[in-house]
Amino acid sequence: MATADNILQQVITYQKSGLALLTNLNCFISSANKKFKDFQNLTANLGSTVSFDLTPRFNTTNGLIANFEAVEQRFQNLTVDQSANISYAFSAEQFLFNVHDYMEKFGRGAVAELGAKIEANVALNCETQPYRFFGDGVTDITTFLQLATALARFRNYGAPKVNTRGYLSDIAVPNIANSGLSQFTTKRNDEMANSWEIGSFSKCEWMQSNLLPVHTSGTEGTQATSLTVVSVTKDANNAITNILFSGTNAASDASSVLKYDRFQFTDAVAGRTNVRFLTFTGHQVSAQPCQFRATANATSTGGSQVNVAIYPPLIAAAGKNQNINTEIVAGMKCTVLPSHRVGLITSGDPLFLAMPKLPPVTPFPSSSEMDPETGVSMRQYYGSLFGQNQQGMVHDNIWGSTLVPEYSMALIFKL
């Protein structure tokens, strides 16, 4: 611990200003599903994992003759794989004469900074998990009509009716609110004009964030390339896991496709069926265009082709896991989103966050607390280096988060 670079004021030169912290919009931490209460209270370390169940899937058979099929207990893991700390040190003289009565402000500032770090990390689920999306990254989301359309598409695929939440870019909210003020909805407009917030709309609670992640797309997305299907690769379950495309913007391009690039099949391609998702429950053709995301970077070949690993696996064969209405064949086309800021729609509380307690740090005084403002649980400990005239304070935390993909849809905001 070093103290030489501390910038402290002599007591006689300043007064406490009472200035509030420059806080962020921590909507992800506050709204995340923390249902694993026992897990939260356990003393754990990095790598601790809890599993939770997902909705079982079945397939309906016509007639009264039973056709027994194997059942699958679906689950998803939540692993505590993130950690962060804020630490600072003083000499004994600095502590006694400069900062002893100032420690509360140091602590509040440290907690706010740590909370922003965790919030931004949890928000990354917007980029990494959903495979469906609304918005093209070119025309921005600025109206209530677009929000209503996004919700309609989200629900058309199938969605729980409870706890629907939308996470908007705070920069987009003024235009959306302004578009609503011209509608003849007196009561809602009065509330919105007074707060200049979206609030509840179409049975969805809309929140705003200034920490939404930005996805940087590969060359095909930034150049608005139209890619053509050449062939597909299927696994043992007849699911398409890779698609080989032709027509890349450049040959031998290491940045042709980047992880988490988002694709959509193009409609009205001559001689080809429009690809649609089936409803998640019931397996009926939905109005939702087939979309997917890349699971790894992909380099184009010298022949301007690129092999893209995709999620979700696409299955046209009849069965409980069928999710598209037609086989993917050569000649179909896809577009890729340009770079964008990623928001989110969820329902049914599918965004999970775990922050288990850290063990005490012997022999230093240790404490684990929950900050009411940010919702961040953390450990705090302090101590001195024997014979070194240094006293240090540490705030640290471990956490893990995950989002169930089929319960979510990305909102695409223009950069």
Image (cartoon, rainbow, N blue to C red):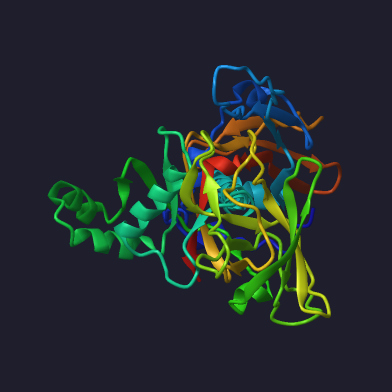
Q: Is residue 1 left or right of residue 101?
A: right
Q: Nearer the viewer, residue 182 or 134?
A: 134
Question: Residue at the location (67% across, 40% down)?
Answer: 400
Answer whether residue 19 is visible to the viewer in this image: yes
Question: Residue at the location (43% across, 48% down)?
Answer: 166
Position above or below: 165 against 160: below
Question: Residue at the location (49% across, 36% down)?
Answer: 372
Question: Residue at the location (60% across, 28% down)?
Answer: 58
Q: Is residue 94 left or right of residue 23?
A: right
Q: Nearer the viewer, residue 101 or 348?
A: 348
Whole-percent x, y for residue 134 in the image: 47, 58
Q: Is residue 66 left or right of residue 239?
A: left
Answer whether residue 373 is visible to the viewer in this image: no
- Looking at the image, the residue that sits furthest to the bottom is 250
Tell me which corner region of the image, top left, top right, bottom left or bottom right, holds residue 45. top right
Whole-percent x, y for residue 60 in the image: 56, 27
Q: Is residue 176 left or right of residue 167?
A: left
Q: Nearer the viewer, residue 67 or 203?
A: 67
Q: Nearer the viewer, residue 378 or 32?
A: 32
- Total numbered badges shown on the rendered structure: 0
Position above or below: 166 against 297: above
Whole-percent x, y for residue 174 in the image: 32, 63
Whole-percent x, y for residue 165 in the image: 43, 43
